[in-house]
Amino acid sequence: MRTVTLSRLAWAVAALFLALGLGGCGSAAAEAPAQPDILLATTTSTYDSGLLDFLLPIFEQETGYTVKVVAVGTGKALRMGQEGNADVLLTHAPQAERALVEAGDVVDYRLVMYNDFVIVGPAEDPAGVRAAGRATDALQRIAQAEALFVSRGDDSGTHKKERALWQAARGAVPQGEPWYLESGEGMGATLRIASERGAYTLTDRGTYLALRDTLNLDIVFEGDPALRNIYHIMRVNPEKWPQVNAEGGKALVAFFVAPETQDLIAAYGADKYGQPLFFPAADKTEAELLQNP
């Protein structure tokens, strides 16, 4: 378990949460349920940012469940759900997620939190991305300069967003171009490759801030409403896949959208990074988030 630095206020809230218990449970650790293990398939950004290392021990203490995290790209996480190989999914690709909802692969589809994507690159910004007015303009500048760009290339939520932006900017993803590299790795590894190569990349803000001190990368473009990054949680449908941990899935979904957990999400990272890594959104709708960047 990695060590996470939080403000005294955030730790105080966490301690109070543990003492009072979610939903009025006692302060002692709960007895293990009949089916104690929950498999959570999630994007690498929730893991690399340290958020899960902070939240999940609280859930485990209060419920007696043990959460096993598989941190992969959102595309892989969603496929795990489609195949009944996970109990709960926490991902950030709403369009792809809705396909699973419509197919009945997942239930209890709930909005949890959001942050945004940013484009990072070398401080000298050889492609002049800082002067761009929109994200698509930023990518056009990178392409015109043939400046090195590292893509996740892993069908993650970040990769899906990047492909959509390239499609809007140029009509096609620049695969095969010598300046366009695909890492096939998670967000943390991709950021490190971009840092080592002096390249640009698209990243969620939370992972970048969590790793910023180890990278030679600056935020060179941010603020376009098209870069909003929305996370949903959902459980795999037990009627379709009877082997999934239905009760554990219900408990974990309820935990993430509970007001106490939403307060912890709001506090996470503010002291160390000067701003929260994620913003709670269980009381909002996706339409509200997209209308109010």
Image: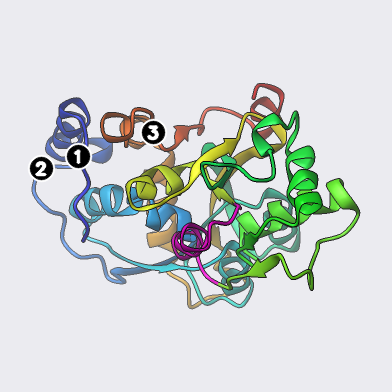
- Label 1 to label 2: alpha-carbon separation: 6 Å
**Residue bearing mark 3:** 262
Residue 101 visible in this rendered orientation of the protein: no
Query: What element does badge 3 sit on?
Result: helix
Is 118 on the left or on the right of 143, as rendered? left
Rendering coords of residue 44 (x, y %): 47, 60
Give the prevailing secondary structure in the magenta stretch.
helix
Span highlighted in magenta in the image: 185-200
The type of residue carrying mark 3 is Gln
Is residue 131 toward the left or the right of residue 31 in the image?
right
Q: Nearer the viewer, mark 3 or mark 1?
A: 3
Q: Quadrant of residue 27?
A: top left
Q: Nearer the viewer, residue 125 or 37?
A: 125
Question: Residue 30 sits in which quadrant?
Answer: bottom left
Disc 2 and disc 3 in contact, CB within 8 angstroms: no
Tell me, yes or no, whether the highlighted magenta stretch contains residue 206: no
214 lies left or right of 246: left
> In the image, what residue type sits under mark 1?
Gly
The number of numbered discs placed on residues in the rendered structure image is: 3
x then y, percent, for residue 124: 55, 42
- Give the crowd class for mark 3: few <14, some 14-19, many >=20 residues within 10 Å: many
**Image disc number at residue 27:** 2
Q: Which residue occupies 73% across, 49% down?
A: 142
Pointer 1 or 2: first along the chain: 1
Asked if marks 3 and 1 touch (Cβ < 8 Å), the reply is: no
Residue at left offset 78%, top offset 53%: 143
Is residue 190 in the magenta section?
yes
**In what quadrant of the picture does the N terminus appear?**
bottom left
Residue on which the image places disc 1? 21
Residue 207, percent across and down?
44, 49
> Nearest the camera: 218 or 202?
218
Question: For residue 7, which numbered disc appears in the image?
Answer: none
